[in-house]
Amino acid sequence: MSNLVLIKDAHSILTGAGGEAARSAASDVRIADGVITQMGNGLRPQPGERVLNARDCVIYPGWVNTHHHLFQSLLKGVPAGINLTLSPWLQAVPFIYRRAFNEERLRLAARIGIVELMLSGCTTIADHHYIYYPNMGYDASAALFEEADKLGVRFMLQRGGGTVTRKLEADRSTYVEPETLDGMLADVERVASRYHQGGPRPRTRVALAPTTATVSVARGELREVARAARRMKLPLHTHMSETVSFLEHCRAEFGCLPIEFLAEHEWLGPDVSLAHLTHLADAELRLLAQSGTGMAHCPQSNARLADGVARAPDLHRLGGAVSIGVDGAASNEAADMLSEVHFCWLMHRAHAGAATRPRPQGGGEAGADSVSVEQVVNWASEGGARMLGFDGVGTLQVGQAADLAVYDLDSPRYFGLHDMAIGPVVAAGRPRLKWLLAGGRVLVEDDAIPGMDMAALRAEASADVLRLMQQV
């Protein structure tokens, strides 16, 4: 297939950039060797170019999903955990099922999750995988990179795991032998030497990502982990402040707030991203913003588990770094980026409105401008790429990677829109994905992944879910 592509006559283009650059006046996008080389109107086809007719379509940057657990794609809607908060849910679902995952099952789950994300318009995925233990018998990291490579997406492994068995994991049904610190760091270095790419428009990256920094490694090891990551020139990632239990634990064990604890142990900075951050004090918000530490905001999972509402707009207003992640499908049964950005846009408005009070005690009606469509798109594209270190990715501008989604708003739910550009975010549903490109390569065409037998994938998933239920 030609590496020269011209996308013509789009109705609207959202660039993913912030501020006044959020919308492009262009209707055409020219791509060569995986990079956007020209944007304008009335561009004429050149010899050898493949022309994609985007009339009546809107173009978005490929979504950047900054926090996922792909193995959970086979754990959607588990009855034992559907009405539980985080701690009991962990015991009832991911912890009890994780030892049932072998290489074949992990590959199937990853394939399902990546396909789901791609069909929502996602081109970059960060997977926080934490099923690691001594003598596993297979290379989980390689399996994940290989499945992502087959489907053509950019992929970051946030290499989780831990050296401590916490109380939630200690009984026979959920126990997994912890790693040693030396063993964990040696394996991260091995994986990074093979897959971690720097420079412009990388395809694969690695982060050092203990599952939960405050409980998955010993306190005396936390600073050593941060220094090891920086020595290897790797970013850091972990779960943090997802529920009130994080606050209770840090106050009881360390006498401080969670973000203060991280600051004491060299775990803040522009090379650090933290998933959830649902419970933050004002002082913690300021620490995050001042240090450049990123938030991987997972609104649907936080709602599903009754965690609360992360203060993403507040962090954004302070100049902090915000991105969007879908979290695992076991706590977000719609683990795709379109559902996520739609819910994010609505949730923060509802949350702001719920905090209003009648006059004279308050200011009356407010909150409908707490987040804009363009802001949410920025979080879910440029914001995520910058946070993960995918330089040259995340916006539709000349010189940037040609990672983009072309949506055809041909369903009745989009009819009557006065501003078609915002349709994929505000109108919910899943618009027909006419094309998805990553690095200029067409990954999805006319809402289908070339060569993907979706019926076979569905049958394979159904059969394996039955085996999982019998096994566990």
Image (cartoon, grey):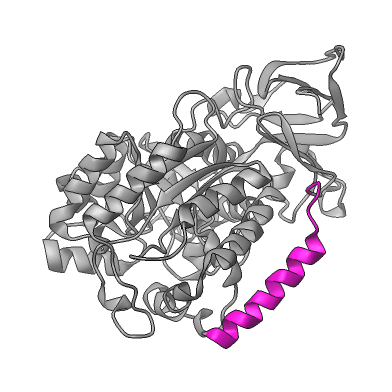
The image quadrant of residue 29 is top right
The residue lying at 72 percent from left, 50 percent from top is 119
Label tally:
0
Q: Vertical placement of 301 versus 201: above or below?
A: below
* Residue 124: percent from left, percent from top: 57, 42
- Closer-to-camera residue (100/30): 100
- Closer-to-camera residue (37/306): 37
The residue lying at 59 percent from left, 39 percent from top is 377
Q: Vertical placement of 471 versus 303: above or below?
A: below
State left or right for residue 401 relative to residue 234: right
Q: Main secondary structure of the magenta part?
A: helix
State left or right for residue 198 relative to residue 151: left
Whether residue 241 is visible, yes or no, is yes
Residue 453 sits inside the magenta stretch: yes
Which contiguous range is marked in magenta?
A: 449-471
The image quadrant of residue 340 is bottom right
Q: Quadrant of the N terminus?
A: top right
Residue 211 sits inside the magenta stretch: no
* Residue 165: percent from left, percent from top: 26, 71
State left or right for residue 241 relative to residue 114: left
